[in-house]
Image: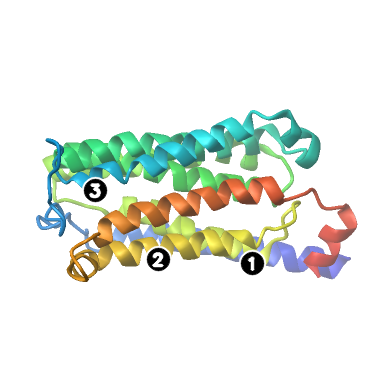
């Protein structure tokens, strides 16, 4: 028993150390500025007066899965089956609300690409990722002031990273470092939390599927032009929206199928 507790403490310290190292890297590394070519998407076709048509309408998947997730979290059966903490529910509500908001922000951006509209596109994304990180923390650690405040502070940190990027674009050298940290470092931390600390729920490994699908979405975004040239039907950026929306759907699916573990099951998974 003592060896399990000691091993867990060591992993917590290593996780804290890694988090500090990632934040330090974002602070000291040369700033990553926003490329002026970012707004030049492969598919710029317009239909029915809507510019960048497919990149605009494909955002509706975020609205659909976001609202579906919020509706699911209102069901009483969720409380009876999983007995989640109220803070966990708040974090997942913020994940789904941010997803729905990303639909509006991304439509605005693709309709009228600019730094301002890109800010409104990125803001809910950063909040959503940090909220998912907060939920992942809450599911693995006993409730205390750290876990309670993480539900509030992590989404705020995500929002601040986006605000700082926009400020830097107008008043300094453009610096995406903190926004990139909010998105990609949160993914790294979620993976480490899931692999190193047992959840109080079953089906915790579903997060690997979720993040893998999001990884494919980012690859599609990078290969925007190449995907579009393959038949001139759909671009990589449009495909990114679809895959990212699918990843959020699997978050909702994970919440539906999971059940609360017994204390014995949690102890065995720690060994």
- Residue at horizontal 75 percent and vertical 56 percent from the top: 202
Front of the two marks 3 and 2: 3
Quadrant of the rendered structure where residue 227 is? bottom left
Is the residue under label 2 in contact with that under label 3 (CB below 8 Å)? no
Where in the figure is residue 56, as x and y percent of width and height? Answer: 24, 43
Q: Position of residue 213 (x, y in %)?
A: 46, 62
Tell me whether circle 1 and circle 2 mark residues in contact (CB < 8 Å).
Answer: no
Residue under label 3: 55
The quadrant of the rendering that contains the C terminus is bottom right
Kind of element beneath mark 1: helix
Question: Residue at position x 70%, y 39% from top?
Answer: 144
The answer to which of 21 and 117 lies nearer the viewer is 117
Q: Secondary structure at mark 2?
A: helix
| Mark 1 lies on residue | 195
Query: Where does residue 29 sit, x and y in percent of width and height?
Result: 28, 64
Q: Residue at x 48, y 41 (%)?
A: 65
In the shown orientation, is residue 148 left or right of residue 236?
A: right
In the image, residue 167 sits, relative to residue 36, either above or below, namely: above
Q: Is residue 64 visible?
A: yes
Give the answer, above or below, for where 30 lies relative to 71.
below
**Does residue 139 appear anywhere in the picture?**
no
Judge by depth and name the residue closer to the eye, 45 or 196: 45
Disc on res. 216: 2
Residue drawn where x is 67% and y is 45% of the image? 256
């Amino acid at each position: 028993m003592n060896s399990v507790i000691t091993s867990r403490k060591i992993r917590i310290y290593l996780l804290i150390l890694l988090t500090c190292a990632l934040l330090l890297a974002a602070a000291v590394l040369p700033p990553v500025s926003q490329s002026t070519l970012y707004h030049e998407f492969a598919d710029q076709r317009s239909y029915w007066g809507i510019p960048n048509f497919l990149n605009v309408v494909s955002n509706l998947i975020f609205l659909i899965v976001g609202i579906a997730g919020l509706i699911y979290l209102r069901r009483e059966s969720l409380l009876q089956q999983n007995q989640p903490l109220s803070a966990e529910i708040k974090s997942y509500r913020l994940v789904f609300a941010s997803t729905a908001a990303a639909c509006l922000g991304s439509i605005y951006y693709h309709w009228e690409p600019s730094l301002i509209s890109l800010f409104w596109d990125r803001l809910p994304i950063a909040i959503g990722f940090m909220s998912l990180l907060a939920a992942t923390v809450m599911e693995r650690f006993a409730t205390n002031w750290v876990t309670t405040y993480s539900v509030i502070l992590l989404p705020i940190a995500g929002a601040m990273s986006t605000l700082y990027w926009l400020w830097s674009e107008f008043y300094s050298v453009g610096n995406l470092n903190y926004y990139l940290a909010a998105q990609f470092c949160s993914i790294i931390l979620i993976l480490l939390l899931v692999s190193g600390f047992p959840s109080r729920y079953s089906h915790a490994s579903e997060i690997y599927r979720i993040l893998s699908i999001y990884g494919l979405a980012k690859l599609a975004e990078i290969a925007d032009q190449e995907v579009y040239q393959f038949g001139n039907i759909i671009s990589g950026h449009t495909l990114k929206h679809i895959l990212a929306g699918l990843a959020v759907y699997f978050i909702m699916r994970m919440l539906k199928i999971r059940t609360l573990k017994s204390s014995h099951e949690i102890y065995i998974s720690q060994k």
